Image (tube, rainbow, N blue to C red):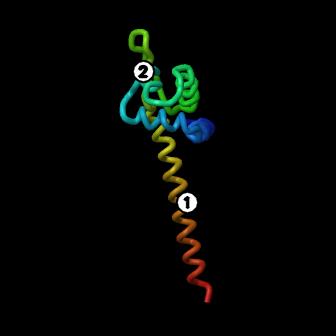
Amino acid sequence: MAANQADDSWVALGDSTRLAIVKVLAERPRAVGELAAELPVSRPAVSQHLKVLKDAGLVTERTAGTRRIYRLNPAGVAALRDQLETFWNRALANYADAVDDAEEIP
């Protein structure tokens, strides 16, 4: 996943409806109608949110008859996890440096 697409993923998750869709899809793959039934938004709105999530690399789709089934994209989710781990490791290292610096001050 390119850096720009990873940034798009964070932006996509900044919307509460899209975050709710991701949470629901974490349970299992679903069609648009199933998602709309679980969320307080219309089917067309769910479709629009899914497009944003798909463009950001967070969901994929497959066709099953006349329906499209959406699921989380493992590669997209892994890229977010990698970024979070990088952020966390930097924060811990900076904290350790700050503690070391504070201990050196008499």
Q: Dot 2: few (<14), some (14–19), or many (≥20) neighbours within 10 Å?
A: some
Q: At 44% across and 25% down in the image, what residue appears?
A: 37
Question: Vertical placement of 97 versus 89: above or below?
Answer: below
Q: At 44% across and 37% down in the image, what residue appears?
A: 23
- Residue lying farthest to the top in this orientation: 66
Nearer to the camera, 58 or 19: 19
Q: Quadrant of residue 13?
A: top right
Q: Is residue 98 left or right of residue 33?
A: right
Image position, residue 74 (x, y; %): 43, 35
Residue type at mark 1?
Arg
Image position, residue 33 (x, y; %): 45, 20
Numbered tag placed on residue 69 in the rendering: 2
> Dividing the image into 4 quarters, which one contains the C terminus?
bottom right
Q: At 47% across and 30% down in the image, what residue appears?
A: 39
Nearer to the camera, 11 or 94: 11
The residues tagged by marks 1 and 2 sit, at their Cα atoms, a distance apart of 38 Å
Q: Are marks 1 and 2 in contact (CB under 8 Å)?
A: no
Q: Quadrant of residue 14?
A: top right
**Circle 1: element type:** helix
Question: Vertical placement of 5 versus 87: above or below?
Answer: above
Nearer to the camera, 97 or 65: 65
Residue type at mark 2?
Ile
Question: Vertical placement of 40 versus 33: above or below?
Answer: below
Numbered tag placed on residue 12 in the rendering: none
Between circles 1 and 2, the one closer to the viewer is 2
Numbered tag placed on residue 90 in the rendering: 1
